[in-house]
Image: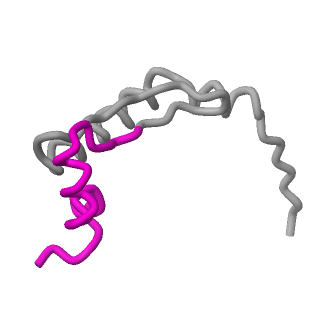
Amino acid sequence: MSKVKFNLDKGGVGALLKGSEIQAIISKQGERIASAAGKGYESKTVIRPTRAVTTVAPDTVAAHFDNLKNNTLLRAMGGGNND
């Protein structure tokens, strides 16, 4: 049995996590979730110190309370009980 040694290139992984390809992928998913949630939800992609991040959040007061009452964002992601 041979021993395999693996050295992770942290700089390369960091560049990958901040790269335009990853940004495009997560932006597309964020927009899909915001669209599935309905009117009043927005998707926003930003680059943080270690990686690109997409957030989906209510953009209106009505959407905020809709999410509190119905778990709209959770359901839009495919989770929760979709009665």
Residue found at x 63% / y 24%: 15
Reply above or below: 75 against 44.
below
Point out residue 67 in the picture as x, y percentages from the top left corner.
Answer: 24, 57
In this picture, residue 61 sits left or right of residue 29: left
Image: magenta residue range: 55-83
* Front residue of this view, candidates 17 and 1: 17
Q: Which quadrant would residue 77 be assigned to in this image? A: bottom left
Quadrant that contains the C terminus: bottom left
In this picture, residue 58 sits left or right of residue 49: left
Q: Which quadrant would residue 16 be assigned to in this image? A: top right
In this picture, residue 69 sits left or right of residue 13: left
The single residue placed furthest to the top in the displayed view is 20
Quadrant that contains the N terminus: bottom right
Residue found at x 67% / y 33%: 13
Q: Is residue 76 magenta?
A: yes
Point out residue 28 in the picture as x, y percentages from the top left corner.
Answer: 28, 35
Point out residue 19 in the picture as x, y percentages from the top left corner.
Answer: 52, 23
* Front residue of this view, candidates 68 and 48: 68
Reply above or below: 47 against 68.
above
Residue found at x 23% / y 55%: 65
Reply above or below: 2 against 24.
below
